């Protein structure tokens, strides 16, 4: 390659900044440190109060951060009043900025029209995804995207706390509990909680944000010391994927590999690195499988897909094949016989087949679920039988949610029932069906972030929310060579989208995603201030 990846700030100096700018840059740095380094590890009263503890930490952090930033912004605008204009500010806005701003407006319109304002302001108890939290997410994005300055120490903020979280998660799956988190917890529900994040779904959401960053950074970097450190991180993270017991995490992992596979056709080096990632992933799966065999008495029994990936012969065969492909491309590169950039048309054909594959899966689900086929191998694949209990009862939830949205009036279809007011309107709509299926448990969301957004904030909210992610993704993909976090953030967006097709917004991961997108935009806006040597 013609360059290494040492990124140097070559133009900006503290002396050039006004006092409000210095305060805002420092406040963003402190907040990012708190959110990335401290937040994942923070807990109170172990698993009995995890959700409220995490929210209290986040609320305390933004209660300090937001006023400081707003006051500093006002002072900055006053000092720069002769230099700034609304026209200049608007010209600087990129597509993602406009979509995020439009999303904020959609949230407040939805709140203003909601019949459930008490819930829609702070959010449903335990979820806290009301209009106030959505406003904080948007403010975080804009503050970070304008006042974030890169420093190499951020790699440590991201990697070390995540590695600790993942290592604790792996240990918990072997009933090793160094922090005593499982004390007093019934044996039958241990599988539902792990590490310092609580619910397994919260854990998998966090995993599907931190892991893609590590994958992209390992794939992007050429310096041996960083490659080794990211390699250690990835071995732990891949091992955690196969022990955390969430099928949606495997979807997110597949999406991460798809993004990096597309970019890997840029050069032989990237393509070789991609296959190193594949080998590390599959090898980590098989090491966990071996440990599950050795410590079978201690290992917590996991569900089908996790067990299949760690213990089946199929993944061993895939590992052998991946090693063979890796050695083949590595040797071909060494001998000067590999020119991967010439095969971009083959890559395009592969990706063109993805929608075909998705359509085929949908058709199979339809045929099996409606009884159009019987006695075939398709009927033996549980994922194809979409009934009420499909996907841990998501079948019922999605069908109920779609029916409820279909019966919305025009206003609700466009603006929703109010941020995080799903439970209120769902039980007002058909409490008998919900209580008959869920009993005393309360269905608080659609367990599909995008469907939930449609119900809570309507079509306007969904379009602006999705637009924020989609425009950011294509912006980062277009500029991925400028910084490893461009590829990393693009990979995170795909991973988060796929994972949360089966999950939901929550207070740990969603603010981190908004901040990561903001960091990417900040690096893009200051691209001329950095040189890559």
Image: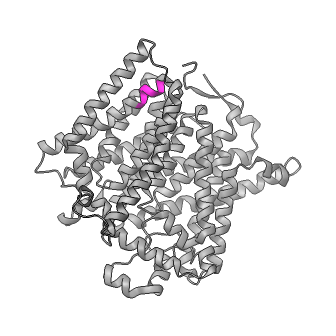
Q: Quadrant of residue 432?
A: bottom left
Image quarter of the N terminus:
top right
Residue at the image point whose x is 49% and y is 79% from the top: 404
**Measured along the vertical axis of the image, is residue 206 above or below residue 479?**
below
Image location (x, y in percent) of residue 519 = 59, 45
When the figure is inspected, residue 52 is found, relative to residue 10, above or below; the finding is: below
Residue 440 visible in the current orientation: no
For residue 174, side relative to residue 240 (left or right): left
In terms of depth relative to the viewer, which is nearer, 47 or 135? Answer: 135
Name the quadrant of the C terminus: top right
Q: Is residue 86 magenta?
A: no
Direction top: furthest residue: 335
Taking 41 as reference, is 104 left or right?
Answer: right
Q: Using residue 249 as the reference point, say whether residue 107 is left or right of it.
A: right
Q: Is residue 271 magenta?
A: yes
Viewer-proximal residue, 366 or 488? 366
* Residue 404 visible, this orientation: yes
Give me the residue at 50% from left, 43% from top. 352
Q: Quadrant of residue 289?
A: top left
Percent coordinates x, y for residue 511 in the rendering: 53, 56
Q: Main secondary structure of the magenta part?
A: helix
Where's residue 23, x and y in %? 67, 48
The residue located at (60%, 45%) in the rendering is: 474
Q: How is the image coloured?
A: one colour
Q: How many marks?
A: 0
The magenta segment = 269-274
Residue found at x 53% / y 38%:
487
Residue 111 in the image: state x and y as whole percent. Answer: 62, 76
Instruction: Decide: is 428 above or below 259.
Output: below
């Amino acid at each position: 390659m013609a360059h290494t990846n040492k990124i140097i700030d070559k133009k900006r100096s503290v002396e050039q900044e006004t006092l409000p700018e210095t305060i805002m840059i420092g406040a963003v740095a402190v907040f990012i440190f708190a959110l990335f380094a401290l937040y994942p590890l923070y807990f109170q009263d172990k698993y009995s109060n995890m959700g409220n503890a995490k929210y209290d930490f986040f609320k305390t952090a933004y209660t300090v951060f937001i006023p400081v930033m707003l006051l500093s912004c006002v002072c900055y605008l006053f000092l720069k009043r002769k230099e700034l204009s609304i026209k200049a500010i608007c010209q600087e806005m990129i597509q993602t900025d406009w979509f995020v701003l439009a999303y904020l407006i959609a949230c407040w319109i939805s709140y203003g029209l909601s019949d459930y304002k008490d819930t829609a302001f702070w959010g449903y108890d335990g979820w806290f995804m009301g209009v106030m939290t959505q406003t904080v997410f948007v403010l975080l994005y804009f503050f970070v995207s304008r006042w974030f300055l890169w420093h190499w120490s951020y790699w440590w903020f991201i990697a070390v706390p995540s590695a600790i979280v993942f290592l604790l998660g792996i240990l918990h799956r072997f009933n090793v509990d160094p922090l005593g988190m499982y004390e007093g917890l019934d044996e039958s529900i241990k599988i539902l909680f792990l590490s310092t994040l609580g619910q397994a779904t919260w854990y998998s959401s966090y995993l599907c944000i931190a892991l893609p960053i590590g994958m992209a950074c390992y794939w992007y970097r050429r310096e041996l010391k960083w490659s080794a450190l990211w390699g250690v991180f990835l071995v732990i993270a891949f091992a955690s994927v196969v022990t955390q017991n969430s099928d949606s995490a495997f979807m997110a992992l597949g999406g991460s590999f798809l993004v990096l596979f597309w970019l890997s056709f840029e050069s032989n080096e990237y393509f070789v690195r991609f296959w190193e990632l594949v080998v590390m992933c599959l090898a980590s799966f098989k090491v966990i499988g071996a440990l599950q065999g050795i410590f079978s008495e201690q290992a917590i029994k996991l569900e089908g897909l996790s067990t299949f990936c760690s213990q089946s012969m199929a993944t061993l065969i895939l590992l052998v094949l991946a090693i063979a492909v890796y050695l083949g491309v590595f040797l071909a590169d060494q001998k000067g016989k590999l020119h991967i950039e010439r095969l971009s048309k083959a890559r395009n054909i592969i990706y063109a087949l993805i929608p075909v594959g998705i359509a085929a899966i949908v058709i199979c689900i339809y045929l099996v679920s409606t009884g159009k086929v019987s006695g075939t191998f398709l009927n033996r694949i549980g994922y194809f039988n979409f009934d009420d209990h499909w996907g841990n009862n998501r079948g019922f939830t999605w069908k109920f949610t779609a029916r409820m949205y279909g019966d919305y009036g025009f206003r609700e279809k466009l603006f929703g029932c109010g941020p995080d007011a799903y439970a209120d309107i769902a039980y007002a709509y058909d409490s008998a069906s919900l209580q008959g299926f869920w009993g005393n448990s309360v269905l608080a969301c659609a367990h599909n972030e995008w469907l939930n957004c449609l119900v809570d904030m309507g079509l306007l909210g969904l379009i602006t929310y999705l637009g924020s992610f989609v425009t950011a993704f294509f912006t980062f993909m277009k500029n991925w060579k400028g910084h490893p976090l461009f590829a990393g953030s693009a990979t995170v967006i795909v991973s988060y989208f796929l994972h949360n097709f089966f999950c939901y917004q929550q207070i740990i991961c969603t603010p981190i995603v908004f901040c990561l997108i903001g960091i990417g935009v900040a690096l893009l806006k200051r691209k001329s201030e950095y040189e890559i040597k």
